[in-house]
Amino acid sequence: MLQSYFRFRLTTTTAMSLRPLRPLRPSLPSATSHLIGLRAFHLRPTIASHLRLHPCSAAPTGAVELEWNDRQRFKQRTVALPFWRQRNSNYGRFAYQDFSSDDESDVELASPRSPAQQQMGESTLENIDEWRWKLTMLLRSNEEQEVVSREKKDRRDYEQLSALATRMDLYSRQYARVVVFSKAPLPNYRPDLDDKRPQREVILPFGIHREVDTHLRAHLSQKPTKRLGSFDDSLHRSSDAGSIHTNDGIYEKPVPRIHNSVVKEKILQRRSLELRNKQEDWQGSPEGQRMLEFRRSLPAFKEKDAFLKVISNNQVIVVSGETGCGKTTQLPQYILESEIEAGCGAGCNIICTQPRRISAMSVSERVAAERGEKLGESVGYKVRLEGMKGRDTRLLFCTTGVLLRRLLVDRTLNGVTHVVVDEIHERGMNEDFLLIVLKELLPRRPDLRLILMSATLNAELFSSYFDGAPTMHIPGFTYPVRARFLEDILEMTGYRLNPYNQIDDYGQEKTWKMQKQALAFRKRKSQIASAVEDALEVADFHGYSLRTRESLSCWCPDSLGFNLIEHVLSHIVKNERPGAVLVFMTGWDDINSLKDKLQTHPLLGDPSRVLLLACHGSMASTEQRLIFENPEGGVRKIVLATNMAETSITINDVVFVVDCGKAKETSYDALNNTPCLLPSWISKAAARQRRGRAGRVQPGECYHLYPRCVYDAFADYQLPELLRTPLQSLCLQIKSLQLGSISEFLARALQPPEALSVQNAVEYLKIIGALDDNENLTVLGRKLSMLPVEPKLGKMLILGAIFNCLDPIMTVVAGLSVRDPFVMPADKKDLAESAKAQFSARDYSDHLALVRAYEGWKEAEAQQAGYEYCWRNFLSSQTLRAIDSLRKQFFYLLKDIGLVDHNSETYSRWSQEEHLVRAVICAGLFPGVSSVVDGHLKMLGGYLEFFMKPELANTYLRLKGELEELIQKKLLDPMFDTQSHDELLSAVRLVISEDHCDGRFVFGRRATPAPKVKEATNSKSSAGVEAENFKNQLQSLLNRAGHEVPTYKTRQLKNNQFRSTVIFNGLDFVGQPCSNKKQAEKSAAAEALLWLKGDMHSSRDVASHMSVLLKKSNKKDKKTSSKRAKWS
């Protein structure tokens, strides 16, 4: 009996080598992704959330590819997943698609080949002209993007053909047995060209399948009959209720201003008079006079009149100011005071953006103090979690994101008179995006004034972007700062470097970490890292002692050098004059690790001599204030900070700066679609900013923990964030603001990002269903644009609300938005890991461990035992409080967009269903796909392949179609009660509850029947030759799956024959009786191969037997401490 399967592929996105896709069959239903993501494939949340996999283009992005494979005929259909999108006919897949085996041509399984491909011949030196013609046709074709060859001779002559392609400005790459020539750059790995990629068979027990069908039929009987698939385009339609069109221009026509009524004018005049009287009273008071005297001493005061004059005559001005000049606190005040003095204070409305919340809060507090007011009167602030703003607030400090969110509902910033964008030199993504929006807005608002402020001397770049806007420079006032580089530090202190004292994390595993750092050093590929390496090779340290030169030869650039920092701080505390010390670290984890290390030091850990403080962007307000306060007499303040202390905040009493030379920043490989957050070298401008933090009150010193030659190799300025981060959130904001085409809008940026990066972001938003094929916002996209989180996290929140498991989902999303609350002290890692393991229980999920830890903390807090709970379980109480605050914010945001009401319990009635919670996590984090097989992580190349029997596939498709309709109704009508479809939800919960869906891994596109051993033992035929490879084939397959080498147990039977059993992964396979031991082992291997390759009968009994085998495997694995292959 021939075996038949439906084969599915869940894919991520790609941007390389695309060609038109065959039209979709309208008779197939639109499949709902959540069911696939919900349980049957049950991705392990702890892995799926953090991985970024190589893209795959063997199937339409975000589609389910159904293949009917009965070994005689082959059909291929494509249906869309919910919240994912269908590719239209002009965009979609690689010219070469799928294949059966190395011996089969690509004609069988691929779409019809192009004329160039059909005329492919052998690629020898004799037919080089033919290849030249093929590549010429490729260049001339508007549809074809690549040519693929599997010919052996083409692989042999690849070097000549690659040279030909290079001369024709084409890209080429060889993937195992495939040669590809393309118009676009090619990634390192192409999963669509890998016929050994893993696939998984999905098996649902017959009883469960029948019960799901019963619920589904009951649901269908309660609704009007509709053609299956009638909701194919429901999530991607472009109606007013679905997508938001953006083809009517960027901004609406200006609405004529309505003249104020007499009453309104009188109110404004009265308020303006009150503001002026209050300002004059303060300035005339003794305390106000002292504050004015201090403000006049700042360098910015000398430029006050010139600044106000330029503002009155120009719509845009670019101000550069050195550290300590007072531009952040004084320039917005000058504008406000000028308007108040002119009697226009009530009509003045100034918004000043800051890149970080801590700077918005601290600056607003300082400005309010300088005006003799309480925060929230004429000066206020607004950040994501909190704010202080009153009726009379005329100067508002906020983060850039807050202003962007205001633009969602007020696209012309009505009532705003001045916008001040501070710290534009940092080139954050939100800041660059805001500049594009404001540049487009200025012609529509000629009364609006824009002030751009930078801490570096790169004002001309911004001036030219705004059509030659005037610039102004304010010199700073700082005392001289002496710079000491690593060679000077080693020479002065006598400290010696060696390979063992440069390991950042002190404690155990020193040797392993040293090897890891050395390996990382050899693998560095970035341009700056290469320049640093080259600078070290040619560096000349002959002016220093032999001891210093030997230390420098051991210096590891990839290490922060905790021990070196400790030694430098000890030297400062012991030998240098009084003054605070500012230490620049890369991130919160390093700050905490270093702080723990310093607290164990006999000198630095003595609270009577040293006050250790941490400074990070997400700190609580009360902890932030300690940074700016002076310590007690005889106590030296040491602040461990991230790069936010370069410009966003100023600690006046800092005299010494310790600079590690690195900062964590996101880098993004658009070709392979992989972002990562890693420490990287800073720029020269950033190093100067760090050095300038010292010398505010007296001459200072800066200890650069890297050689001068490394500093000379730094880039002048940091790469803009827009060019080195994924753009999904930014693209969603562009569409929500109705700013037209995403690519066209970003092309107008100060420094536009790569086209490939933009395309990847757009494709991602289409995969998750936030955009339709025409790049219009879908209903889901509109909801996501209202949530200030990443799209994947916002989708998770929405699904949690729809499926009534919101409470744990809010905890998960909040945890992913801040940081891991579990702390791992280096000297107590085993205890910390044991404590975390208690929360993760048997599901090994970091996310569910976070949920359980938070719930336990809330219970402990109710009993006034929160601190003890955190101490006992190695948890950060500060992080848990941040998570708690974010959870409240998320609920209010979901309430604002109409998905929830005041009764939070209603939306958490299924919160105890862990399988449902895990399913929502997976659906939200898709397409972050991975698998764990026997403890080995399997990178699935951006997609998950699985197959199932036709009757089971039909059930899934029907269930998915109905579920998509339900979700669509809920998004369109938040008041819609999903519980009215109880039969459908019961079917869903039944599928995802417990571990009913089981299966096995199969490698290769098509399972090929293994020849019978009997033929091999009785003849010398070719089958006998193949039989010789049974054991090798089995071992190769198991190695590829990450299993151990199989073991054989052979016993002699009474009839002088032998029977062998092969054992692997807890499974036993018994072969046929054979005449000798060698043949018996081959027979057992053949039986195992039959099972692994899928050549079993397709009856339900056999399928159930396979499921039993896998469950048996699970029991044996527990005894042998090896995990069975599973998706979790």
Image (cartoon, helix red, strand yellow):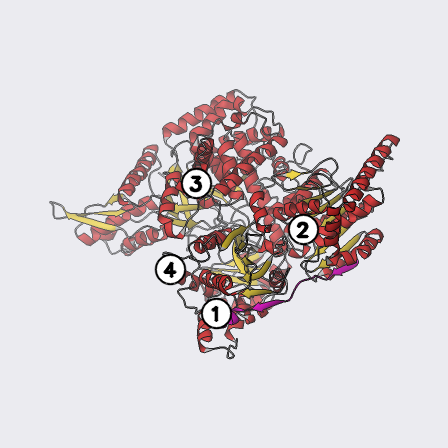
Please identify, in this view, whether the residue under mark 4 or under mark 3 is nearer the observer.
Answer: 3
Q: Residues within 10 Å of mark 1 (few under 14, many from 20)?
A: few
- Specify which label sits upstream in the sequence, 1 or 3: 1
Residue 1076 percent across, percent down from the top left: 17, 52
Residue 175 percent across, percent down from the top left: 47, 59
Q: Residues within 10 Å of mark 4 (few under 14, many from 20)?
A: some
Which residue is at a point 49% across and 63% down the rendered structure image?
574
Type of the residue with mark 3:
Cys
Please identify, in this view, whether the residue under mark 4 or under mark 1 is nearer the observer.
Answer: 1
Residue that numbered label 4 is attached to: 510
Type of the residue with mark 2:
Glu
Q: Are marks 4 and 2 in contact (CB under 8 Å)?
A: no
Residue that numbered label 2 is attached to: 431
Q: Is 1011 on the left or on the right of 182, as rendered? A: left
Residue 240 percent across, percent down from the top left: 69, 33
Q: Is residue 780 above or below residue 436?
A: above
Q: Is residue 472 magenta?
A: yes
- Specify which label sits upstream in the sequence, 4 or 2: 2
Disc 4 element: helix
Q: Are marks 3 and 2 in contact (CB under 8 Å)?
A: no
Disc 1 element: helix
Q: Is residue 153 magenta?
A: no
- Specify which label sits upstream in the sequence, 2 or 1: 2
- Asked which quadrant contains residue 234, the reply is top right
Please identify, in this view, whether the residue under mark 3 or under mark 2 is nearer the observer.
Answer: 3
Q: From which residue to which does the magenta span run?
A: 467-492
Which residue is at a point 67% across and 54% down the rendered structure image?
423
Mark 3–mark 2 distance (CA, rounded to whole Å): 38 Å
Q: Which label sits on residue 493? A: 1
Disc 3 element: helix
